[in-house]
Amino acid sequence: MMMATDALRAQVAAKWQESFTRLNQNEPGIVGLLNFSQAWNIARECIRPRGLDEPDHSALYDKSTFQASFELLNKCRRLPILLESFLEDMRKRFPVIKEEVERYTLEYERTADTSFILNLIFRLLQWYKRWLPMQELGATLHSAFVLSFQTQLFSALTPTFVRGFKELCASTLPSTDPETDGPAPNVEMWKAFETLGLLDRYENIIASVGYEHIEAHVVATCTGQWSVSMLGQLRKWMTDKVVPWMLLMYARNATSADDARAMLQNVGSRFDFHMAKTLCDLRTKEIFDIIIDYPDSSGALQDLKECLHRVDQRAFLVHTLRKANHKRLLHPGADTRLILSQYVATIKCLRLIDPPGVLLFKVADPVRRYLRGRLDTIRCIVSNLVGDDDSGDSLIDESEPIQPLQQSDLEDFTDPNWEPEPVDAGPDFRANKPSDVISTLVSIYDSKDLFVKELQVLLAQRLLAIADDNTEKVERERRNIEILKIRFGEAALQVCEVMLKDMTDSKRIDGHVQSQKTSIIHPTIISKHFWPILEATEIVMPGQFRTFQEEYTKEFSAFKPDKKLRWLPHLGTVKLELKLKDRTVEADVPPLEAAFIELFSQQDVWNMDELIAHVGSSVDRTAALKALLTWVDMGILKELTEKTFKLLEVAEIVAAGARAPRAVTNSAVELLSAPGVQQQQAEQMKVYWKFIEGMLTNLGSLSIDRIQTMLKLAPGYDQTIEQLGVFMEAARLEELVVVRDGMWKLTPK
């Protein structure tokens, strides 16, 4: 035990002697130790953190004395201890700076004046320079000071300071008004930011200030400005206004234009990207209205195309436009013509933005499905094709060449211009990419046969509405059919050719009959098997009208003994001249009105039921009442009691305030009652109701897909699931079925 204690004492003594020798520097006695103590005190005093009102250390000692003291401490290996002592002194004195931070930030919070934040930064810079050790004392001491000062400073800065710092940076930006000059650049402020480490600490905040300024300018200058491209103006504004501000932050130390350009390359690219993204976001939000305004919005579309090349927001554009279409377009309150017009504009706009058609394919699908469910879609398209749409908004671009309907074919990989499908194209993309607008509209449906049938119906209505002497309209219809033959093919429009031929033959036949026996009637003679189904109303024309018909039929049979003439007396127009005791009235009226007024030549008073019995019991009572009221409005008849009418041979004086007679209108168009294709399909669907009723009776609830699958087993069933859905919805409105969670069942009795 005694030996261990002696060894420890000897070891401690050796260490002590070693330390003393190092500190004494081999000087006699304790002279070296005294020199070390003096050097320590000088070094401590030299680097001691001082108050702003205290004298500078350079006033106490010259530079050579400082350097000699630090060299002695370095030889004695005591600089690390000195550094620790210096950092501890800083930590103890830092509450003084913290108080300054609190005082200035409270003033800013009270006044919202960023000058307090600026004054605080310059105040902090004073403290920083006051405590900064001399560069001659070495890089280690300098680095340790910077790290410690910034660490304690950042821990003292409050969220209020951060908010004020952001507003201060924003105040240095140029005004969004191009006529107003921005504030003069404060270079000293940016240098202070860099010295205090605020640039690195709050780099994201400073960048966000620039981003928000760009966003505000883009929104202020580009919202609703669609006629011209804005990207060029925005980039010029960036060069003139934003780049000088960026130089202060990112390229202050540049010595030449090339140095500045190199320093700004990365950050400039980020700011330009943000500008493109902001404009892309704005145009995406406005896309529905931009499409409405096309072609006046071509500039905005060009901007959007360029921005989408820079910013990958194609999916967001598709989502936004589909959502806008669902909210503003695809609802019962929107007219089908409006939906089609917007759809055509969408086709043209999205092809400008994305020529391959991927965006159009994704946006158009909900519109196409909705249009398939509308009963009048085909008729609206066909009306535009033949120029029968009075809305003024043609779906057809006159500059687009007339060409056959395009069908999607397999890709030709030998084509030198072939390009692979875009990466975001769907699996059915090629199968739904016709190039011209008409082909796109027709491709809404699986077959063009529906359009051909509708063309036949529409042509029949238009031909039957043409007066006998109006050959110009017949020729116009002939020209329309020639154009449509280019689109649909000659075979598809053979029936239309037959109808046009019937019009020519009818005029020739009527001319022959008139040459044999002059008649005041000029019927249009059509082929029963080539014209669409015309709703027949069995009106029996009385009196002289029947005589005229019989005489004409006799002459026709003599000319065409192998043909039988069947009259459709509910169609056409009758031009009458009524000679009464005190006046003569001329009117062009439908046949039913003419039949009724003819009966009044036999007696003056008739009951409506008696009139109907004389012209045919199948006449609708509502139509009969309407026909009689036509003559009442003209002052020819008078309603004595309900449904009893009297002929006025002498006109009655109309009392003041009485209802004025309505103008006589040619209602021939109303009588052209050839049903549309989709109406005929609805009639066909009624045949299959028994099948549907049997399914729901035996199997209970069924989905629309299951009903469609089972109906395909029925003979002759060729309806699409969309047409079945329309029929089922009509059955629901008639309370024949109910639907819940997509399952259909019979209405409980």
Image: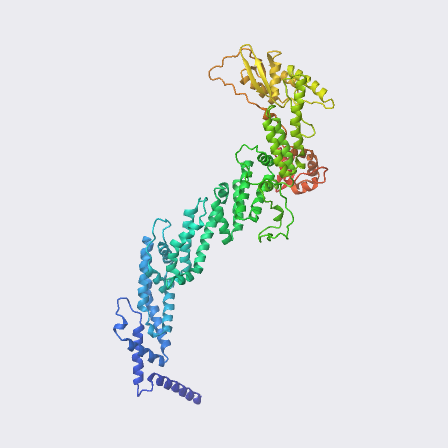
Can residue 285 be spotted in the picture? no
Q: Residue at x 63, y 44 (%)?
A: 407
Residue 42, relative to residue 652: is it above or below? below
Q: Residue at x 30, y 73 (%)?
A: 46
Question: What is the count of numbered marks?
Answer: 0
Location of residue 138 in the rendering, given as x and y in whole percent from the top left corner: 36, 74
Q: Residue at x 70, y 36 (%)?
A: 691
Frontmost residue, 11 versus 224: 224
**Which quarter of the figure has residue 561?**
top right
Residue 544, relative to residue 25: is it above or below? above
Q: How is the image coloured?
A: rainbow
**Which quarter of the figure has residue 339?**
top right
Location of residue 721 in the rendering, given as x and y in whole percent from the top left corner: 65, 40
Location of residue 298 in the rendering, given as x and y in whole percent from the top left corner: 48, 44
Residue 48, relative to residue 236: is it above or below? below
Which quadrant is the N terminus positioned in? bottom left
Give the residue at the far top of this rendering: 581
Give the residue at the far bottom of this rendering: 3
Frontmost residue, 11 versus 456: 456
Location of residue 530 in the rendering, given as x and y in whole percent from the top left corner: 68, 30
Can residue 542 be spotted in the picture? yes
Taking the image as shown, residue 230 lies to the left or right of residue 369, namely left
Which quadrant is the C terminus positioned in? top right
Taking the image as shown, residue 388 lies to the left or right of residue 171, namely right
